[in-house]
Image: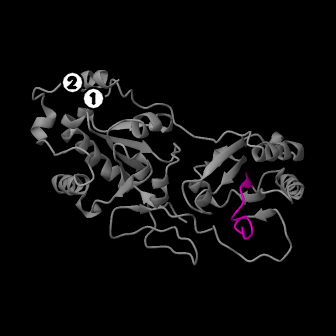
Amino acid sequence: FKSWCQLPSPCRDDTWTLHCLVLLPLVVLAAPAQFRRITRDAKKSRWFEFPDLQGAADLPQLTLMLDPTASDFHNVYNVSIQVAESFSSEKLAVVLLRADFASTLKFFKIKAGEIPTVVIVNWTNGIGQRPYQLYLHSQGEPGRLTVPELQGFGQMFLRGEVTQWFRSAPVVDDPVQHDSKSGALEIVGSQFQRLVIDDQKDVLVMFFAPWCGFSKRMQPRIDELARRTQQFYRYFAVLKIDDTRNDVDHPVMMRLTGYPFLAFFPAGKKAAAEQIRVDGRLLGDSEAWLQEAMTKLQPLATHSISLMSADAADGEQGLLTDAEERQEEF
């Protein structure tokens, strides 16, 4: 595949799809096409080579993401088979994933420079579906890819002794000092629980990818929405997060099939977050996009919200400064 933002027309696979819609400015990011189900022989095995995952769909998968051109590839290949044999009676599969499946690495948010990566993938919502859970063994440490190391890691996972791997970028902005006149607050994975789930207000979150042109087009609209609803800071917040660098384990992520992705988390019912769809054809008209966004948000909001004028949003208009507002919140 070409860059997901640059596919000239919808690209489909007979099972799962990875495609771009050209009618609306939205990058569609479905589970990679390579997650195919291919019939295996009747032999019961715990070893699988991607994309042939028939028989592994209902199991956590100790996944070795390897560079097939590496000098030790064949050795680690054999190691993975031996490890799988040791788990033949356990609820754990071993999957070998070659790094030339670039779209699949992107699905797992793994960069080429992080290969080899070894993780256990727990498909909590079905194979190829978000959100999934990852448990990290190692990245960029080929010396650790031995039978004893991988067997020990798998056994620790089965005993419940491995902590889930949550990736988070470094903090981008201090929520206390952030000035909403500069736009929506950008958060990272380590802040998501506190600023979205635990916060007793309605929260709209834009999940974006920095390489996605459609995300870049929507970002000014999200920033303007934050500016023009700042007077409702006690009840409503507009945030954004780089989904390619941060993990969010929430049921609404099952709906994320492309960037940008908008999700509304209502106060008191954060588990019932909903996807918000705003006509992408309106991105070229700021006022039209904002008005449609409000028509989608107002019925869901737990408190009345509306847009202030652009002039009022840019001026003081008797409001507290954003830093003063945040100091009151925290």
Disc 2 designates what residue?
Answer: 321
* Magenta span dominant secondary structure: loop
Q: Quadrant of residue 45?
A: bottom right
Query: Is 135 left or right of 212, judged from the image as shown?
Result: right
Above or below, 119 against 322 in this view is: below
The answer, for residue 261, to whether it is visible in the render is: no
Q: Residue at x 61, y 56 (%)?
A: 124
Mark number for residue 80?
none
Q: Magenta includes 304?
A: no
Dot 2 and dot 1 residues touching (CB under 8 Å): yes
Where residue 50 appears, as percent x and y from the top left, is: 72, 64
Q: Earlier in the sequence, mark 2 or mark 1?
A: 1
Three-letter amino acid code at the position of disc 2: Thr
Question: Looking at the picture, how far across and down is residue 302, in whole percent?
Answer: 26, 46
Q: Which of the two residues, 100 or 199, is positioned nearer the viewer here?
A: 199
Q: For the C terminus, give its image quadrant.
A: top left
Q: Is residue 50 above or below residue 140?
A: below
Q: Of helix, strand and loop, which one carries label 2?
A: loop
- Amino acid on which the number 1 mark rests in the picture: Asp
- In the rendered view of the protein, which quadrant contains the N terminus? bottom right
Quadrant of the rendered image containing residue 32: bottom right
Which residue is drawn at the image coordinates 10% and 38% (left, top)? 311
Q: Position of residue 90 (x, y in %)?
A: 82, 56
**Residue at horizontal 42 percent and vertical 61 percent from the top:** 27
Query: What span is in magenta?
Result: 50-67
Question: Can you give x and y, in whole percent of width and height, for residue 301 in the image?
Answer: 26, 48
Q: Nearer the viewer, residue 4 or 158?
A: 158
Would you name the residue on which mark 1 appears? 179
